[in-house]
Amino acid sequence: MSTDSYNYFGRDETYLDKKLLPFVKCGGYVYIAIPGMVRDCHDSLPSELLLSWTPEQLDYMHDVSYWTDMVSKCRGAKVLTVEQMQSNEEVWADWLSQDNEYAVGDRRSMDAGAGKYLNFIKIVLQKNDFAFWGIVQITLSGISITIQFAYADYAYYFREKTRAHRSVPPCS
């Protein structure tokens, strides 16, 4: 589970496949909750947002469309949902009631009406039944061939003979 941090390191489109999914069991879930924007407005940041955050800090906050595109590039998991949290107002109110320096600093913007630009976004992924390894593209005599490699836990495969009909055995 990642709460209020994935937006910092998750903007690297290879992060899920290379860094996070190796620690999630096959078929397991990844739950992410992050602050976001109702609509990306980085080209023209509203003054209310700039009362608490710099443009560089706001660059970590994006809308549902951005995050859908980002996590859809992951090959090792299926995207189940990317959407604004229904508890958006409650989550912001809970955050702003905290006495830590970051929540206190965010109050200026929110008191000035920045809440109409911001939301909280939930992302739910399910790791595939195989651990994706990579893609290789080969060009021979002008013909391009793409080969996908998958890794699976074959020890588990041989223990679970009832699953032997699957083309890519599940990993444990």
Image (cartoon, rainbow, N blue to C red):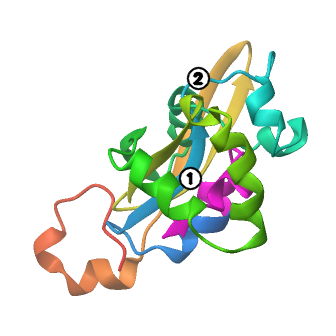
Residue type at the position of mark 2: Arg
| Magenta stretch, residue numbers | 1-18
Left of 71 or right of it: where is 105?
right
Q: Residue at x 42, y 46 (%)?
A: 88
- Number of labelled discs? 2
Alpha-carbon span between mark 2 and mark 1: 14 Å
The answer to if 10 sits in the magenta stretch is yes
Can residue 10 be seen from the camera position used here?
yes
Q: Which residue is mark 1?
A: 34
Residue 60 appears left or right of 91: right
The residue that appears at 31% across and 68% down in the rendered structure is 170
Residue 149 location (% of width, % of height): 54, 51
Q: In the image, 53: left or right of 110?
A: right
The answer to which quarter of the image holds residue 167 is bottom left
Tell me which amino acid carries mark 1.
Ile
Element assignment for label 1: strand
